[in-house]
Image (cartoon, rainbow, N blue to C red):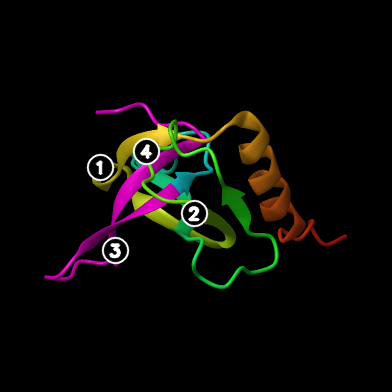
Amino acid sequence: MAIFRAGHVVKVPFPHTDKNTRQHRPALVVSRGGIGKDDALLWVVMITSAENRKWPGDQTIQLLEATGLPIVSLIRPTKIATIEKRDAEIIGEVSNELLTLVMQEICKNIAPPSP
């Protein structure tokens, strides 16, 4: 099985639940790798076409070669999901600079512990 890390662009089945009809969509791994029991899960954020309306916090993927994506796309940090690691396939990766911007957006939305 592949070794996943934050910054990998993966192809995942969508919807993430068991349905008869599945399509594959790109996503960005934001966990440090496998998490949960037996490291069987990944946290990922949505990657969508740049043709879609941009949301606050979205990051544009311009450099496509390393990502494995066919078109300019948006990373949407507000759409985070937990998926089964076995369902993900690595197709590329984003730059450390772009990953840092995505992680900063995620951190903006995580509440600190209550006093």
Residue indicated by mark 4: 68
Residue at 11% of width from left, 70% of height from top? 20
Of labels 4 and 3, earlier in sequence is 3
Q: Is residue 87 above or below residue 115?
A: above
Assign a secondary structure to mark 3: strand
Instruction: Tell me the quadrant of the picture where the C terminus can be found.
Output: bottom right
Q: Nearer the viewer, mark 3 or mark 1?
A: 3
Name the amino acid type tagged 4: Gly
Q: Which residues are magenta?
A: 1-27
Residue indicated by mark 1: 86
Q: In 3D space, how far apart are the residues under numbered discs 2 and 4 (Cα atoms)?
A: 11 Å
Of labels 3 and 2, earlier in sequence is 3
Q: Nearer the viewer, mark 1 or mark 4?
A: 4
Say whether residue 2 is magenta: yes
The label shown at residue 14 is 3
Residue indicated by mark 2: 73
Q: In 3D space, how far apart are the residues under numbered discs 2 and 1 (Cα atoms)?
A: 24 Å
Assign a secondary structure to mark 2: strand
Q: Residues within 10 Å of mark 1 (few under 14, many from 20)?
A: few
Q: Nearer the viewer, mark 4 or mark 3?
A: 4
- The x and y percentages for residue 36 are 43, 43
Of labels 3 and 1, earlier in sequence is 3
Assign a secondary structure to mark 4: loop
